[in-house]
Amino acid sequence: MNKLYIFLKYFFIVVWTVFVVAPFLWALTTSFKDFQSVNGGVTYIPWVDFEPNLEGWKVLIKSPAKGGVDIIEPYFNSLFVTCTASLISIILGTLSAYALSRYTFKAGFVKNNDITFFFISQRIMPPIVLSIPFFLFLSSINLLDSLTGLIVVYIVLLMPIAVWIMVDFFNKVPREIDETALIDGCNPYQAFLKVVLPNSIPGLIVAGMFCIIFGWIDFFFAFILTFTEVQLLPVKIVALNSSVTPWWSLSASALVSVAPLIIVAFIVERYLSKGNLSGAIK
Amino acid sequence: MDLVANNLSYKPDDQYHLNEVSFNFKEGNLYTILGRTLSGKTTLLKTIAGLLTPDSGEIEFDGKNFLKIPVWERNVAMVYQQFINYPHLNVFENIAFPLKQRKIDQSIIKEKVMDALKSVGLLGYENRKIQELSGGQQQRVSLARSLVKNAKILLLDEPLVNLDYKLREQLREEFKNLFSKGLADETILIYSTTDPRETMELNGEVIVLDEGKVLQVGPAKEIFENPNSLKVAEISNDPPMNIIEAKISDNQIRFEGIDVEAPQHLSKLTEDGLKIGLRSSDIELNENGHEFEVELAEISGSETLLHLKRGDTKIIVSIEEVLNFKIHDKVKINFKINRAYAFYANGKLASSPFGGLNG
């Protein structure tokens, strides 16, 4: 019974691992293939099945003049836009969430819950609905096809996520903790910074991860709001496609674009396993 | 330095949480706020701390308008009934927090925190995480944090209510020792509780609060001996005082076919609708007494609480030993009638065995 249990456990772990890792391996081998190796039937093992070459990777860094696509600049554009927008969203979102969780707002029939819903409603609408207003808005302030414009749009898209997660989180932090901080001599800002925020790190990490993921993978708005001046990675990857699909360079760029998310996941996982996230608030 | 309140009222919804509350607290004294749940105890403490602003009324401390001073500058300390500490700090850092906030020298902080730890019996725990402590220990940490500040006003909001029986007894004893050592002569100590026994043991000045209104103010002994109304008698006794509707005539107290000779302090009362109040401990089992039927018998600790019934009259008797009864058993009881209270139909005290009013 016990041996069977252990066997089954490892069996499923192996199956699941294959399931999860296979696409990455597939992309990795494909990135080293050339036209013949991709189209000449199923091949897996380099040097045995096919002759690996670096063409797929070289295309990514060669300038267009030399027949490449140069994803380096879009890559850093994407990193910059995602990180800046996520950071600003987290800061603004956390502050708004704290206010919504602790203070009572009232303007006519509009109350706290309505304001929270207003934030979330930004995500309920399909992106296509938002695209035209965003386009007109950015063009009226001359920010179309610019990094700043993209950051503004991404803040609008990411901040609701941060507000949503953090309101829920702050509601679970007992109000008495803030009150005790006030009684112990903190003004409201100090109470927030010295007591509430250090106890909200798990929520901040979750909100941050969601912002980074949603910002990083967005194609739609990056596609609509940029033309030639700036380009983001997802748009550039799609632009790789031509009459002959270059599976090798598509695979290579897919791996490069997933890399930052994998790094974030590993850091958070380390942090999780140290137990720093659990037990902060009962 | 006195803490004086005038006509504090607070009505956030359709019910008063505080209704025209006034008091005059003097330094170096212990005040107990006694009231049932939702009577406004926590609201009153939060108002004193500055966490709530009353709709009307004023609070003065040391001659200054307290309502104009924000919480963080009031120099009060408060212990909540939930064990509130800072989860991200260890025991030492928790207790040191209010001192660091005042930018006190590191070595003085250390000395003071160690003193506070010692006085709550937690020496050796300074590097523990808060989550590793038991409920009682967590409450000691929050008590230490409130002691270390040397606050002029110390507020304790039902600090023992969430602890188990044994710990409660033990901590209550320690509280009494701490308080009697004279925390500091200038401290005003305000302790809220629902437990009449706790009130009597702490033996301070008692404020009886109900639905946001102050019903009676006086030393614990006075509240116990001469509750000024039926409500106060109910709130300040556990189990609640037995209330029996009776008639007094010809020197006899009559109810449910029972005639008891009226003691001197009750004999002159002749009004209609009188209610006789008798504590559960002032009724005893007696072979020659009056027959009642057992409705329920509960054993709590070394005590037996008998819920008895005769006609429409229901009473509770507490007996200082563990006895077994069955439902519908008949028991015979005697009333220590010379310890009975009388209340008028409107609930006001008519006469008390301890010499209140007509006695």
Image (spheres, rainbow, N blue to C red):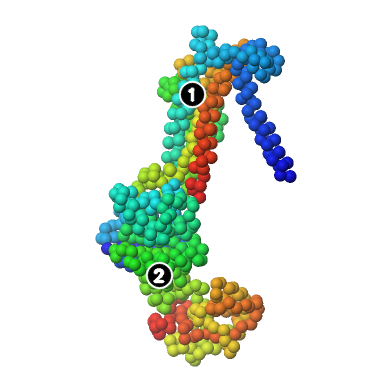
Q: Residue B83, position in %: x, y?
A: 46, 56
Foreground pick, A190 / B56 = A190
Foreground pick, B323 / B226 = B323
Foreground pick, B314 / A10 = A10
- Label 1, secondary structure: give it: helix
Would you say the residues marked 1 and 2 are in contact, meaning their CB atoms lie under 8 Å apart?
A: no
Which residue is the extreme one toward the left?
A: B63
Report whether B94 appears left or right of A235: left
Could you tell me if residue A245 is visible in this image?
Answer: no
Q: Kindly indicate the quadrant of the structure image that contains residue B180.
A: bottom left
Identify the residue position indicated by label 2 in the image: B202
Q: Residue B126, position in %: x, y?
A: 41, 53
Give, as a three-letter code, the residue at label 1: Ser
Which residue is the extreme one toward the bottom?
A: B250
Mark 1 neighbour density, 10 Å: few (under 14) some (14–19) many (20 or more): many
The mark closer to the camera, 1 or 2, is 2
Give, as a three-letter code, the residue at label 2: Leu
Q: Kindly indicate the quadrant of the structure image that contains residue B123.
A: bottom left
Please, is residue B315 above or below residue A123 in the view? below
Identify the residue position indicated by label 1 in the image: A78
Q: Residue B48, position in %: x, y?
A: 36, 59
| Residue that appears at 27% across and 63% down | B1
Report whether B352 appears left or right of B24: right
Mark 2 neighbour density, 10 Å: few (under 14) some (14–19) many (20 or more): many
Could you tell me if residue B272 is visible in this image?
Answer: yes
| Residue that appears at 61% across and 14% down | A52
